[in-house]
Amino acid sequence: MLARALANGGRFAEVFAERRRGLSMSIDESRIEAVQSGAEEGAGVRVVEGGTTYFAHVDGLDPADLERAADEAAAALRGERREPRALEAVAISPLPIELRPEDVPAERKAALLRELDERARGEGDEIAQFTSSYAEARREVAVANSEGLLSSDDRTRTRIGAQAVARRGDAVETGAETLGAHRGFELLEDDPGAIAEQAARKALTLLEAGPAPSGSMPVVVGGGFGGVLFHEMTGHGLEADHIQKGASVYAGKLGEQVAQPLLDAYDDGRLPNEWGSDAIDDEGALTQKTQVIEGGRLTAYLYDRLTAERDGVVSTGNGRRESFRHLPIPRMTNTYIAPGDATPEGMIAEVEKGFYAVSFAGGQVDPATGDFVFGVSEGYLIEGGKVTRPCRGATLIGNCLEALMAIDAVGDDFFMKTGICGKGGQKAPVGTGQGHVRVGAMTVGGTEL
Amino acid sequence: MSELSTSAGRAVEAALGAGAGAAEAYASRDSGREVRVHGGEVESLTAATQSGIGVRAWVGGRVGYAYGTDLSEAGVEAIAARAAEAAAVADEDEFAVPPEPAPVEALPGLSDPAVAAWTTAQAAELALTVERTALAADSRIVGVEQVVYADAAGRVAIASSAGVAGEYESSDCFAYLQALAEGDDGRETGLGFGLARGPDGLDPEAIGAEGADRAVAMIGAVKPTSRSCPVVLDPTVAASFAGLIGGALSASAVQRGRSPFAGRLGEELASGALVLHDDGRDPGGSASAPFDGEGLPRRRTALIEGGRLRAFLYDTYTANREGTASTGSASRHGYRSQPSVSPSNLVVAAGALSFGELLAEAGEGVFVTDVAGLHSGVNPVTGVFSVGASGRAIRDGELAEPLREFTIAGDLVAMLGSVEATGATARWVPFGGSVSTPPLLIGAMAVSGS
């Protein structure tokens, strides 16, 4: 196929083949529903010549399907035939899966959702609605390129999510929690029902919430999914495609002090069985641990193959694609702020008037301007060094460079959480992590003016 | 009968053979291309073909779904068997009954032969023209992050054991760019876009100019002071909010107590200025089709009219729960997704005021041109929202300095009541689904800046 793809020339050709299997279901109104089973296979073929990538993808893995993709990718080229190098298989070990989800009866997955439903509703009569979902997905991928690389990976991810709605009179609040990993069903053997109770408790807590404050103030951000703050305000701006197009506020800042010396941060695609981990990226490069900030200094960008080539460096193993239907682009894997030495209690105690964002519903950044926004899913007011009352409907906004520099405390209570990141129309599983972090000043946008 | 309908029919038979009491199959095949341009060169050219089938199986009141890409005879049989297997896992639901067929009227004009006729070189030239226009528009435009042109043409077929059968063809295309402007204190981005059934319907110069205008307009932006004030929403922003409201009007959200509109049918929630329809047959809307995701006719439904909440949107299942009829609102994102209730094309009626008159009416306030963080800043259950925004100040009824890094906050229901006027010119926008809307004047909204 590689020879076929290079029939009209090209300095690089690659075939990416994939088989996807998945099962998902949910519980709503205490009924198991939306049971869905998927099976897809297909391939994407790309040929690179000059600055242009020619890409074609097809559904199906029959030789005829692959030939069609290779011919379509080559169709727009007008050069001389090139020969690919002989393939040499690279042996890699996929991340270990102890209990394959497909070997577990579907009824057991339904029973798990029923348990979550009962436990959430057990948190009190004010839990008016509860919905929970289960999803397993296996991606077997193989990649071969004209430079002789042949590699493959076998990835299984499992994830559950819980969302509770609490009601008291006219007040309605929601709470959500997730648990996921690059693991099999063994992920769910250690009390998965706890996330249902956590989601329910969040919703119940928010019933007491008042309006969120507005204006600039110190913000303490919670551990785990609080790391989405760093993911958005720094991680995306370090992806080399944004840098090379002048569409990142971090362009030209390598080696510069972009944060206080207390800050160290990494992108690490090799964290054992983490949600954003894989053995290889989707171009066949081994995933790696990349320190992006060392002592507050910007030390690295995140590269896929083509952006690395352009900068004369090697890929950092960040070439990821949603499926065989997409081109690889530089993407984060698991991105986190390394643990510091502050305690959550200590950093809150030092705040006279501020905001405590325990977790986010998500966030968004424009890497070119650095403007970001985060929706707070669980937030509290800090008054006189103490957490006082819950707030609803808060958003944090700001500019990356200012907010990153304003991080003045990093907690020791580190943990990771799962996220689904969207970029260029492609979704990718990413891990985010940190202990509690304090930003000296940030704009909180609430309704209390 | 086309090959697709044959596959769908075969899948229905196979599901019945695998133990399903009733079955429905949705098959699609499409081909598309995408051109990305940067710095006067083609960065990537993508050619794509996709085909697959999704099967819904009913076993008593239990429903299961399976999909796959293998359309061979054996492949389709395996998918159908998995659907029946999935149904066995679901719980019994008395309202889960297969849709009964209803007469479907053809909807011509969904497919533009120009999509197939245009060469890739023509498509690339269109994208390059977008980029050139943006770069030439203003000396402060220093680059274009990327220009994307994409088109697709395809066919959909549906069949069911209850007698639903249908097939149609459609095409669409779009182009957009993200222009970069350089100011004294950093870069600004500006989005320009266009969408149509075929490439002849796109105006590359207008798309390029819009991106450049939007980026340049943001140079020197400052934070507004926090206050409650009149707000004018650009159509791109109004569309996002219309999409959120449309989603909350779907019967599945309402019936499950997850909509701020639950129990409020017939109430006077909106100002008379706001008229909202769901129109699944508007030829301009990209979601238009003769039938919906379960083969029932698409139609026009008044959602908000005369200030009152007139209707919710239903598929067969949600309609059965209330003993009413489907509004043809079962949507799918291709064969991989089972049908669920959502708006087709949302149409906000245009009013009488020119853009200048809307600003004059606002007097002192904010013109919001972009919002960010909608997926995380809006609670669809309560309707409470707080999202990041940028735009321009409105002073003495005219546009003044650019504004950035602020939020607008409120709740969706209250917002409907404070729509004071709508602009005279509506535009199709691909945000919030497929929405046609003019700019909207909101009487008062919480703006949080410095």
Image (tube, coloured by chain):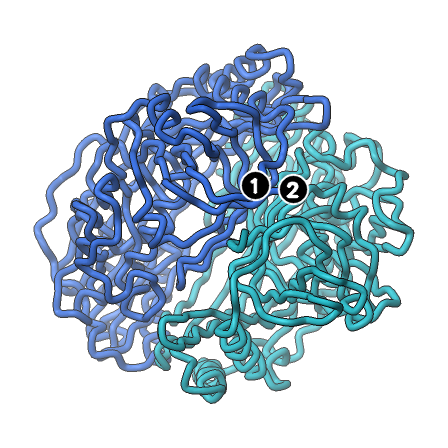
Chain colours: A cyan, B blue
Element type where label 1 sits in the image: loop
Q: Residue B339: x percent and y percent? A: 30, 59
Observer-nearest of A85 and A122: A122
Residue at horizontal 39 percent and vertical 45 percent from the top = B241
Q: Which residue is mark 2?
A: A329
Residue at horizontal 56 percent and vertical 13 percent from the top = B132
Give me the chain letter of mark 2: A
Residue at horizontal 73 percent and vertical 67 percent from the top = A384
Q: Amino acid at mark 1?
A: Gly
Q: Residue A238: x percent and y percent? A: 75, 42
Residue at horizontal 30 percent and vertical 48 percent from the top = B417
> Quick check: A399 left or right of B390?
right
Q: Amino acid at mark 2?
A: Ile
> Quick check: B130 left or right of B313?
right
Element type where label 2 sits in the image: strand
Question: Which numbered marker is on residue A424?
Answer: 1
Observer-nearest of B204 and A224: A224
